[in-house]
Amino acid sequence: MLPIDVAAHGSRWRRRHPLEKALLGLGLTVTAVCLPPWPGGPLVAAATLAVLLGPAGVAGRQLWRAFRIPLGFCFTGALPLLVAVGGPTGFVSLAPEGPRHAAELLLRTSAASLGVLLFAFTTPVSDVLPRLVRAGVPAPVVDVALVMYRIGFLLLDSMTQVRRAQAARLGHAGRAAVWRSLAGLAATSFVRAFDRAARLQDGLAGRGYDGALRVLVPETALSWRFLAASGALLAVLITLTLTLKGLYL
Amino acid sequence: MHIAEGFLPPLHAVAWGAASAPFVVHGVRALTREVKANPESTLLLGASGAFTFVLSALKIPSVTGSCSHPTGTGLGAILFRPPIMAVLGTITLLFQALLLAHGGLTTLGANVFSMAIAGPWAGYGVYLLLKRFDVPLMVTVFFGAFFADLVTYCVTSVQLALAFPDPGTGFAGALVKFGGIFAVTQIPLAVSEGLLTVLVMRLLMQSSRSDLVRLGVAKLTGRSGQEAAL
């Protein structure tokens, strides 16, 4: 399994209804995207961090490992905003408002990424997928997604093993060998994916498979207190941002 | 190229979501029809999606000396057809956003449009066009994967240029800026992905012809039942 999903399975909020966590985490993301980046970004990011490291109980190191990936993309993505192309100042020049736009983009993307991480770190994908049928997603699509989720991890493990075996056989020594190894790795993944599906098909056929993958979804009640607290937090963030923006900026 | 979470302004995020929706709905209908007709195809489609997901974990060397991962859109479109790829690509992008913090949920619509719709359709179109002119299979596969990759990045450049127009020259200047930055790395990467896809297809022709026949990429010909590539 991947580190975020492992953390989600052991999360303090694992037993909470996914809708509660979606309202909070994705609500924070949407708030970060819709509010003015200053002071909205830092306020939303601070509130999300407080929830992540406090009540949600996510380990700081795990969070940093996951957060540095989108943060890196945000940094590299913001760099082009620093320059302008064409115009009277030459083909490439520094954009007059570039640093401000880049900083605002960084604030917005950082805060929004933390909101998604809050949802991802507390909600295993396997808890979300079966419930999507109730949300109106066709059952066949959810079944395909469930199979993708299960087989995906097995394939990733297989790929790690194959890659290690290739390296041990000097499969990464030289450019030509790297290309051969990569092609072999992708082809092996394809073959193993279909082989796994065929074996799964045989196993399910023996248990009376009729086309629907039924999984047990633990019943969890919605906590109206949690929903109300989440709504209140979002309302406070919106009010605070707009007030500060109106007063000082 | 995944657009990161929160990168697009709200209106753009919603607009790209709306633009992607008809293609994804079309794909969902195609997938539902397929599963209803052949219940066992759920597992094959799931395996296909898992393969698409792990393709993004491959690191391919670039001519510029850096390393990147293939989009897999060309290979996916050739193997599974663009409507199915729209659904599998959407699920893959959702998993990448939630499990790898790669891409995002507010930018899902934009990423789906570039990687699960525009790229696959362009690649598949080139693949079909060349096949009609009896171009050898591996050449069609190369250009299918190359254009799928390239169109994905071109569409991403357009999306970013629309969201962040240049202060002096507007959309055109921003398109030159983002396109120019991508061109340095992405044209070599598109070539790399095309070559890798050819190597993968050659191996699959040797090891998994029956699966390729089932997917319609290869067919049985002649009385002896000997298989040949389409």
Image: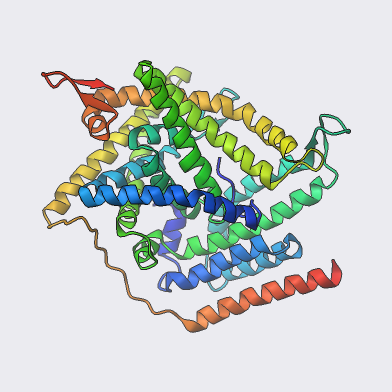
Task: Judge whether A97 appears above or below A25 on screen.
Answer: above
Q: Is residue B74 above or below residue A35?
A: above
Residue situated in front as seen by the camera: A221 or A71: A221
Residue found at the very far right of the displayed protein:
A88
Seen in the image, is B165 located left or right of residue A67?
right
Which residue is at the front of the view, B7 or A137? A137
Residue A5 in the image, given as x and y percentages of width and height:
43, 57
- Vertical placement of B101 versus B167: above or below? below
Vertically, is B37 above or below A180? below
Q: Residue at 29% of width from left, 29% of height from top?
A: B217
Identify which residue is drawn at 43% across, 74% down: A16
Judge from the rendering whether residue B23 lies leftward or rightward of residue A116; answer left or right. Answer: left
Q: Quadrant of the C terminus of chain A?
A: bottom right
Q: Which quadrant of the view contains residue A125?
A: bottom left
Image point (31%, 32%), residue name = A188
What is the tally of numbered marks visible in this picture? 0
Residue A107 location (% of width, % of height): 70, 57
x 56%, y 52%: residue: B107
What percent of the width, then of the height, locates residue B187?
57, 26
The chosen color scheme is rainbow
Q: Quadrant of residue A156?
A: top left
- Residue A235 at least partly seen: yes
- Position of residue B19 measured from the top left corner of the image (x, y, whole percent): 53, 49
Nearer to me, A150 or B158: B158
Q: Is residue B193 visible?
A: no
